[in-house]
Image (cartoon, helix red, strand yellow):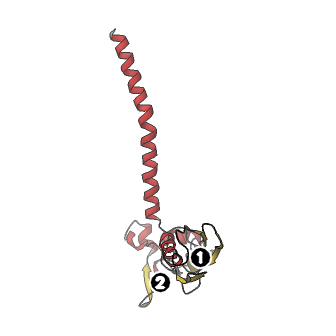
Amino acid sequence: MRRKNLNIRVLAISLLICVWLPLAVTAQEQTDEGDITATFDYKIKPGDIISISVWREDDLRSDVLIRPDGKFSFPLAGDVDAKGKSVEQIRELLVKRLSRYIPDLVVSVSVVAINGNKVYVIGQVNRPGEILVNPNIDVMQALSIAGGANPFAQLNDISILRRTENGLISIPFRYGDIEKGKRLEQNIILQAGDIVVVP
């Protein structure tokens, strides 16, 4: 009798684990996905291409290029300022503008091509040029993608040129410090348009 009760308990616990484990994994996956979405909420930049479609409106479906001024044109919505906005923010803006003409509309916005999120590495590196950033890279990663520095590079005099609202600024970067594990805060995340200069 005791053995029978023990077997029933073991069976019940096994069934409970079988039911609970998939639910726990699913919940964790949903949490992780939410964290990734929040962390990498991409901001639209000039040169990017986005796709816009309005449900049941064939004339309101197209891929649009974000112009150098950060704007794009769309029928009935006019010029829309997309620079620095997320896909969801652009969708909400389009819904607000188009709802004047189309009731109960459903708008979808997605990123087709990330062409505006670029940084540049120039100077004494093996492969100077532009780097498409997706989603983020730091200075060391950019140098690695550029093939590393050549023997003539002055690694402790590297600078990052960044254009801000107040003008162009220069951010110093000493490779030797990073190599020794010191002043790691120098290894900043690069922003679109940054220029890494390796003299």
Mark 1: secondary structure: loop
Q: Residue at x 41, y 36 (%)?
A: 20
Q: Mark 1 Cα within 10 Å, few/some/many (few <14, many 20+)?
A: many
Residue 118 at x, y percent in the picture: 56, 76
Query: Which is more toward the observer, 125 or 83?
Result: 83
**Rendering coords of residue 100 (x, y %):** 51, 78
Percent from the top left, x then y, of residue 134? Answer: 55, 68
Q: Is residue 199 visible?
A: no
Mark 2 vs mark 1: in front: 1
The answer to whether residue 148 is left or right of residue 59 is: left
**Mark 2: which secondary structure?**
strand
Is 9 drawn above or below residue 121 in the view shown?
Answer: above
Residue 113: x and y, percent? 62, 71
Q: Amino acid at mark 1?
A: Asp
Specify the label residue 79 is tagged with.
none
Outermost residue, right direction? 58
State how many labels appear: 2
Mark 2 Cα within 10 Å, few/some/many (few <14, many 20+)? some
From this viewpoint, which residue is outermost toward the left? 2
- N-terminal of the pair, mark 2 or mark 1, is 1
Please report contact status of discs 2 and 1: CB closer than 8 Å, yes or no.
no
Q: Quadrant of residue 150?
A: bottom right
From the viewer's perspective, tell me whether residue 10 is left or right of residue 89: left
Q: Which residue is mark 2?
A: 162
Does residue 160 appear anywhere in the picture? Answer: yes
Q: CA distance from mark 2 to mark 1?
A: 20 Å
In the rendered image, the quadrant that contains the N terminus is: top left
Q: Disc 1 designates what residue? A: 48
Q: Quadrant of residue 25?
A: top left
Amino acid type of the residue tagged 2 in the rendering: Arg
Identify the residue at image location x=35%, y=14%: 5
